[in-house]
Image: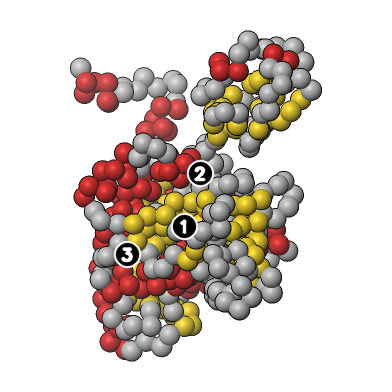
Amino acid sequence: MENKQSSSPASFIGSTVIPGDVVLDLSSMANQTIKLGDGLREDRDAISAMKAGTLRCKKPNKYRIESCQKRYVPCAGDTVLGIVVDSKRDDFLIDIKGPALAFLPVLAFEGGTRRNIPKFEVGTLLYLRVVKAKFGMNPELSCTDAHGKAAEFGLLKDGYMFETSTGLSRKLLSSPTCPVLESLGKKLPFEIAVGLNGRVWVNAASPHTIIAAANAIMNSES
Amino acid sequence: MEGRLANAWRLTVNDKNFIKTALLSEIRIDGRKPFEYRKISIKFGREDGSSEVQLGQTRVISIVTAQLVQPYRDRPKEGMLSIFTEFSPMADPSFEPGRPGELAVELGRIIDRGLRESRAVDTESLCILAGKFVWAVRIDIHILDNGGNLVDAANIAALASLLTFRRPECSLGGEDGQEVIVHPPEIREPLPLMVHHLPIAITFGFFNNESILLIDPTHNEEAVMNGRMTTTVNANGDICAIQKGGGEGVPQRVIMQCLQLATSKAASITKQIKDAVEAFNTERALRKIKRHPTSTGVDVREKQNQ
């Protein structure tokens, strides 16, 4: 495996890489734990890219490849919008636009016990957190944050849900606030929930506002 | 089985309620009014008789071909017109390859009825030798992308391709005048089909509430609406066909309202199709002029620029 060996990992961060590019040289970084996210693979002494996109690094040591696509690859820690497909005895089956349906355990709610299991009918929209997502396994979801509190997760009532690409949903969630949301917010009052799986939910008082906001966000990705 | 469940398109409870709520305020989720059509774009391929129509997100291709066959015994002086539909799986996750499903057959029937019963295409002019040789015109409709309202888009595509199709010219020859000689297009200019009028299909959607009525439903609206009706009318105001596909019962005055609305929409769509066909024909004629290298043709456009 010859070709490019970068002297420092920082040179590739933020730039576009294609499959096969060696993005990190492990021999120069001893005694460091690195967490690999989506799109990266360990190859003997180096980390190489498996898909085309931009290399991102989250301090202190998490690396992943970001690309804009319609399909969603479930990743632990993501917040997504899921649609209930079926309810079983121990969990709900949720569609999160990934390759497989995800499970939401019946008790994964704040103060959830066997006695107060919520009843979700098929087609209900929920705001969820991905707990576990490994290749080949069905992802596991939760309606609480890592500490067990409800924190805005759960049922989304009324409003309108539409689908976008994963790149747009990441842009909408970026900080500082995305310019589309900022300028829309100055003119229209609305509430919005963005899922990293390419689903966005908008709610407002009047249908005109909802439709204007939804179309503005959809068209912002040209 | 689970893999298929994961890939299906789903409608949430929120969307179902929102579409109906918005319609009560006379607005649709893509910002249209209830009686507004999406933007129609008609494009043609290089060959005669192929067209591609885009209606919002819906895309349909139509190809027209013709073959010399023996006519039916009870109709020896008439040519034949047949329509085949193919719902490609790339258009929608619910389309399966292979045998056409119910929706495909219904779509084919609606277009076929609009063209055949109203005698839009003159089949008698397709007869070359009575009882022996007639032209059988075949329209193949391929659905590329399902964004709702496939019937209307497919109908426009079929009409556009019929108007630009050219069949080879043939003459009778041989010793007893019973042989048909088909002239290749380079020798004799192929002839267009005789199309008397353009039957345009307009689809309506009905909901539980009688006051909600919409035209040209999108994919989401089709999943939510309770009844549909396709009326095929032409610009002269003749009603060529009506198809009501199950669902809610509808009072008579609503049907009359739909028919009146359809006639006004048909006029504008007919004009759009005719303009597109004319632009294609002009371009085709220009291409023919440029094809002859021996003639000292003057490029009219160049002269105008000087």
B244, above or below B197, in the image: below
Same subunit: marks 1 and 2 = yes
Display coloring: secondary structure
Tell me the quarter of the picture where residue B101 sits.
bottom right
Same subunit: marks 2 and 3 = no
Q: Picture coordinates of residue A117 (x, y %)?
A: 59, 75
* Residue at image coords 32%, 75%: B213
In this view of the protein, can residue A60 be seen by the observer? yes
In this view of the protein, can residue B230 be seen by the observer? no
Using the image, name the chain to which the residue with label 2 belongs.
Answer: A
Which label sits on residue A151? 1
**What residue would you read off at disc 3?**
B28
Look at discs 3 and 1 and give the one toward the viewer: 1
Tell me if A110 is positioned left or right of B255 in this view: right
Q: Picture coordinates of residue B174 (x, y %)?
A: 64, 51
Q: Picture coordinates of residue A42 (x, y %)?
A: 74, 28
Q: Nearer the viewer, residue B118 or B106?
A: B106
* Residue at image coords 66%, 20%: A24
Measure how far apart labels 2 and 3 are at the Cα level.
25 Å
Tell me the quarter of the picture where residue B4 sits.
bottom right
**What residue would you read off at disc 2?**
A166
Q: Amino acid at mark 2?
A: Thr
Q: Amino acid at mark 1?
A: Ala
